[in-house]
Amino acid sequence: MHMNVAPHLLTEDRAEYERVLDDALSTAHARPELAGVGSRLTVAQLRAMTLNATALVTSAAASEYDHFVKVREQNRASAGARDPDAHDRPDSGIGTGTGAGVVAIVTVMVPVLAGAAAVIFLLVGAVLHALAPTVAFGATLLTAGLVFGSLAAAGLLCAAAGLLVTALRNSPVEVSTGGPPAAPDDELSRAREAWRHALLERGILPFLHDALAATPPAPTDP
């Protein structure tokens, strides 16, 4: 059995309409106006009738539904306007990212190479100085080792500073607006609940009540 869809009821909201209907039918025993459920019409019969009368039922909450759709479209438009900005940031920084990669490699390699050279020069210079104290080449190697050691230390400091700057740059920034942050989904939730309430109270329940009232009770056995 196919459900007749009201002209103003979008396809994405059909499931919500059915959920409101199912909630009403599942709590029919607690509603005096639906006392005839089961004796006059079954739940399955009422559900099929209400789905076939979707255009009539949903028209009772047309104003709330139109407001709900308007708020939802505004939220989607706002989200779509924000997304391109987020996607543009990586694209606009392609050249910057490449340069930053080269700088990072150099920053990492300089302390490593300078440290390795310092260790080699200091070891060789110390050995030569111990074997031949009068040879000036050993002292030269020791001096070169100290120079490369200084370069390694300076490179480590630059790398640490670069890591600190990167961490500060990537940290989230909180902007104070002088009040609690706005929740864009609050209005949408209120609009959805208003539509659901109007759909239930002015559409579904009256239709179920009229359907039960128009159906005579089943004859009882003598």
Image (cartoon, rainbow, N blue to C red):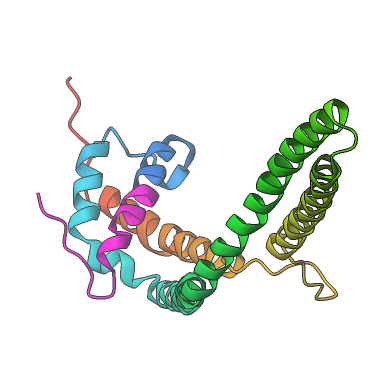
Q: Residue at x 83, y 71 (%)?
A: 179
Q: Quadrant of residue 115?
A: top right
Residue 112 to residue 83: above or below: above
Residue situated furthest top in the rendering = 222
| Magenta-colored span | 1-21
**Is 18 inside the magenta-drawn segment?**
yes
Near-viewer residue (122 or 218): 122
**Is 209 inside the magenta-drawn segment?**
no
Position of 215 with respect to 141 (left or right) is left
Residue 197 percent location from the top left of the image:
49, 60
Near-viewer residue (138 or 48): 138
Q: Residue at x 37, y 58 (%)?
A: 206
Q: Quadrant of residue 181?
A: bottom right
Residue 115 to residue 72: above or below: above
Residue situated furthest right in the rendering = 133
Position of 111 with respect to 213 (left or right) is right
